[in-house]
Image: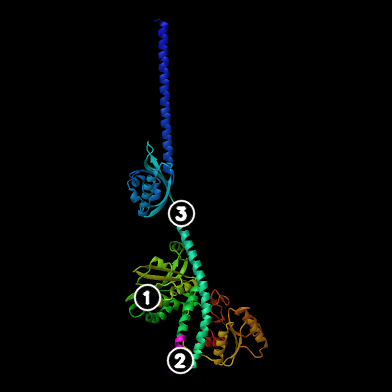
Amino acid sequence: MSLAMVLRGLQSSLDHEKTLRQSLEHEIDERKNAEQDLRDSEMQYRLLAENVSDVIWTIDKAQRFTYISPSIQKLRGYTPEEAMLIPLENTLTPVSYEKAVFVMVEELAIEGDPGVLPDRSQVLELEHIRKDGSTVWGELTTSFIRDEDGLPSGIIGITRDITDRKRAIKEKALLEAQLQQAQKMESVGRLAGGVAHDYNNALSVIIGFTEMAIDDVDPDGLQHDNLNEVLNAARRATDITRQLLAFARKQLITPRVLDLNENVESMLKMLRRLIGEDIDLSWLPGTSLWPVKLDSSQIDQMLANLCINARDAIDGVGKVTIETGNADFDEANCADHSGFVPGAFVQLAVSDNGCGMDKEILDNIFEPFFTTKDVDKGTGLGLATVYGIVKQNNGFINVYSEPDKGTTIKIYLPRHEGNAAVIQDKITTEIPTGHGETVLVVEDDLQILKLARQILEGLDYTVLTAGTPGKALELVKTHAGKIHLLVTDVIMPEMNGRELAQQMKSLYPELKRVFMSGYTANVIAHHGVLDKGVRFIQKPFSRRDLAITVRKALDDLSE
């Protein structure tokens, strides 16, 4: 073999070795680049996982955590190392854990369906347990981790804190429910007010003519007793209609500044008789109580209704407690308690150790005619009346009750800046009579017009009557003598009683006025509160009521 051939072979070997070395170096470079890319990718993933606010996590098929990102500490208060040691069942509340397991099993079953596309994600809202024992809501987006054969080997998920969103949804739902309840109560109130107005007109006739009939029969005869039964039934019906008006917030009130403790104490004797000897009535007055401004008769109504309800909730021997106190609520207090209003209030609470109520009953207790009592033992108007009175006086109510643990109803009335008036004992007076004064009665209900005429003429008044405001104005223009007093219905055709009184005032500047109605409808009263110097008589009225009101108006006596 020639030297040239040897040299060519050697060169070829060297070239081949060089090519192999270059190829190997290229492979090494590619592997280094791939490893660097992998490290870069892992670094980017780790930076993302460790700095994103959402929690990234993985679990295997045995429900063991294999990775949890550091943001778990913000969400649940645990470090990743602590969180990975906690079993999944202790990570979630029981209800949420059951939901998570159910979905996991369901998804695994779906995986076996060849018609289902792989890698579909699942979104869940679950409640997690924090390290301090509180809970937090998380929105989980999950998908399966697959092995080299494409089978699920675990789950990767991202958890986002949605606690604020859940709270906002809950508050919105609560506000919507409160709005619907308020609208429903307002609608029922309007209906109740209208029904009460119509019934009051009818009851005025029944009571008035029955009273006059009683005066004309033998006091010892059977007819006298029968008429008394009619009168008693009409008065019971009157109480019901007045409760309806209280619920509807259409009854007339004459508020004044009061010491709530004094008003409650003046009622204690009557309340003890009302609830009976088997029930202990405990009175716990608050000290340095702030004054409130409302009609004292409304306090009597509320206490009577609350104590009767408490009595009926007690089977046999029991205890009813009445308490008062001052309460000052800020925005934070009200945010935590539905229905509370910021401000200074005086609290009136009535508690009992009776049967209590469940949530279903609590949701309906202020609706008129709702009652759990037997048909012959309750009208369902007691708490509806309390509700109406409290709302009319810009207060609010809180009720706490549990089955077999009793009930506490707390009423909060706005604090009034001023001194309380002194309570005076009610004096029973004889029916006052007239001195021949001329009274003009205007009423579009002819039966009530006839009744008022007979009552007033029987009391020695000179009575003129008109069925409409127009006829009343015609009458006064042709009447030669003086008219001392106008007694007029509030709601009438042509014009209302207030407008009639204003027109008549121009003809008789010193004319005294008495308004009467089944309810005021804010025609002569602003928000149900009587203007100073305006007299009002609520239908149905008795002979005594009309006599006293007319006499006070003529004598210009204060209430």
How has the structure been colored for display? rainbow
Q: Quadrant of the N terminus?
A: top left
Image position, residue 309 (x, y; %): 39, 75
Structural crowding at the residue carrying mark 3, measured as other residues with C-alpha within 10 Å and reported as few (<14), some (14–19) or many (≥20) = few
- The dot on residue 165 is 3
- The dot on residue 70 is none
Image position, residue 36 (x, y; %): 42, 32
Please check the rendered image and state whether residue 219 is part of the magenta-colored stretch, yes or no.
yes
Q: How far, Cα to Cα, is label 2 from label 1?
A: 36 Å
Please check the rendered image and state whether residue 447 is part of the magenta-colored stretch, yes or no.
no
- Number of marks drawn: 3
Residue at 47% in and 64% down: 178
Tell me the SS state at disc 3.
helix
Residue at 42% in and 10% down: 8
Image position, residue 310 (x, y; %): 38, 74
Structural crowding at the residue carrying mark 1, measured as other residues with C-alpha within 10 Å and reported as few (<14), some (14–19) or many (≥20) = some
Residue 296 seen from this side: no
Q: Is residue 58 above or below residue 128?
A: above
Give the foreground label among 2 and 1: 2
Amino acid identity at mark 3? Arg
Give the residue number, with chain letter if any, for mark 2: 223
- Over which residues does the magenta segment extend? 217-231
Tag 2–tag 1 contact (CB < 8 Å): no
Amino acid identity at mark 2? Gln
Q: Is residue 76 above or below residue 438?
A: above
